[in-house]
Image (spheres, rainbow, N blue to C red):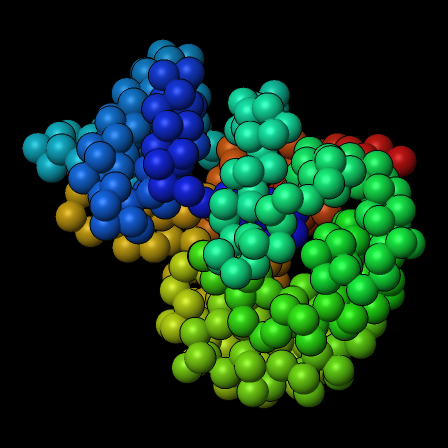
Amino acid sequence: MGIFGRLFQDPQRDLERAEKLLAGGEPFKALELAERAAASAAHRPGARELASRAREAIVASDLDRADRAEASEYWEDAAEWLRSALDHLEDGGRRAELEARLASAEERAREAAAGEPLDLRAFAGGALEVEAGELSPEEVYEALVGTLKDEVADLYDGRPEVFRRALVDFHDGRVESALAALDELLASEPDDPAALLERGRCRLASGDAGGARADFEAAWDRWGDEPLDHAGQTSVPGLWAEASLEAGAPEAVAERLEALAEPSRGRADLARPYALSLLAGERFADARDYLAAAVPRFGGDQDLPYFLAQALGRLGDRDGAVACLESAIAPSCAGGSCNKPPLHLPSVRALVVLHLDNGDGGLERSGELLTRLARATGGRLTAEDQLLLARFHELDGHPAAAAEARAEAARLRG
C-alpha cells in the first residue's frame, strides 16, 4: 500500500484492535497485532498476555477443525490443522499427545492417498483474513500521521481538508480521487514536499512509475535519505527505488543505493529494492554476496531469503536455493510456541518448482507444499498454481487430473 499502508503501527491501538479481532473470532490477526505491539517495552506485558490468549483460541479452533476432518476421514486436512495447533501450542504438556495424533493422521493420509491424485478442492472457499475499517476519516488521518517521525508529521499538521481527504482516499484504495486532489494542490504550490511525496505514491499505485519517480526525485532533497516513520520502514530513497525499478531503471537504483543499502547501516527499507536491482541487472554473484549478509541482518524480512534463493538458482546452486527457501518457510518453533510469520507464498511456489524439477525425488515434498499453498489461499489457486499442480499430477501418474488442472489454468487466464 506504500508509506502509510505499511506504517500503521501504534502499539496501544494495535492492542485495542487485537482485542476486538480476538473477540470477533479472528485470532490469527489478533496474534499478529499483539506480537507487533510487544516490540514496545511499555506494552509488552499486556501484549504477551493477549498473544497467549490468541494462541489458545487458534489451538482450540484448529483442534475443532481437526476433529471434524478426522470424522470425515479427510486425513491430510486433519494433519494440517494439527500442525497449525502444534505451531501455536504453549502448553508443553499436551505436545506429546498432539504429536502422536499428528503422526497417526499423517499415516492415514498416506494410506488414503495411495493410488489417488492429490485433491486440493477441500480447501476451496476457505476464509481469507480481511481487515474491516473501524475508524472515521478524521481518525484514519490522525492515525496515519501518528506513524511518522515528529519532524515529518509537523508538515502534515494543519493541512487543508482537500489534502487530508486525499490521504484517507489513498489509504482506502480510492487512488484516482486522491490523485486528482493532489494534482489540484500542486498546480498552485508545485514545490510542496508533502504533496509531491503523496502524489508520487498515488502515481506509483496507479501504474505511472515514471511520474512517481519524478515526484520522489523532486521531494528527495527536502526529505533526505532517512526513514520518514518511527518504524524505519519507508523513506524517499526507498520509494524512488521502487518507482525506478517499475520504470525499468535497475542500474540507476544499484548505483544510487549501493552505499545507503549496506546491511551494516540497518536500512531494511532499502535492502529489498537494492537486491532487486542486482537481480534485475543479472548481477547474480553480487546479489548472492549482498543477500548473504542482508538475510541474517534483517531476519524478519521474508522477501530477502526468496531473493537469495533466486540468485543461488541462477548461479546453478539448486541445493542452496532449496535449503534457503525451506528455512525461510519453516522458522524454528522451539520451546513449545511458534511466532512464525504468515506463509510466504512466493517462496512456497518457488520451492514447488525446484522440487518438481527434481522429478520423483521431489514429489512427496511438492505435494506437501501444494497442500500448504491451497490451505493458505483458501483454495484460491492462481493459473500458475494450477500449472504447477498439473506438473505434479503428471509426475504422480495421474494424467486425467493433470488435464483437469491445465483446463482450470486456461479458464483462470480467460
Where's residue 214, x and y in %? 83, 68
Whether residue 148 is visible, yes or no, is yes
Asked where in the image residue 154 lies, by quadrant, the reply is bottom right
User: Where 172 falls versus 149 (above or below)?
Assistant: above
Can residue 386 be spotted in the picture?
no
Q: How many marks?
A: 0
In the drawing, does residue 41 fall left or right of residue 67?
left
Q: Is residue 131 left or right of residue 250?
A: left
- 155 versus 170 height, above or below: below
* Image coordinates for residue 335, horizontal then vertical, percent: 15, 48
Q: Residue at x 56, y 42 (%)?
A: 144
Of the pair 103 and 359, the residue shown nearer to us: 103
Residue occupying the point 40% across, 34% down: 13
Residue placed furthest toward the front: 158
Residue drawn at (50%, 48%) of the image: 147
For the point 30% across and 50% down, the residue is 39
Residue 167, how many percent across, how many down? 70, 41
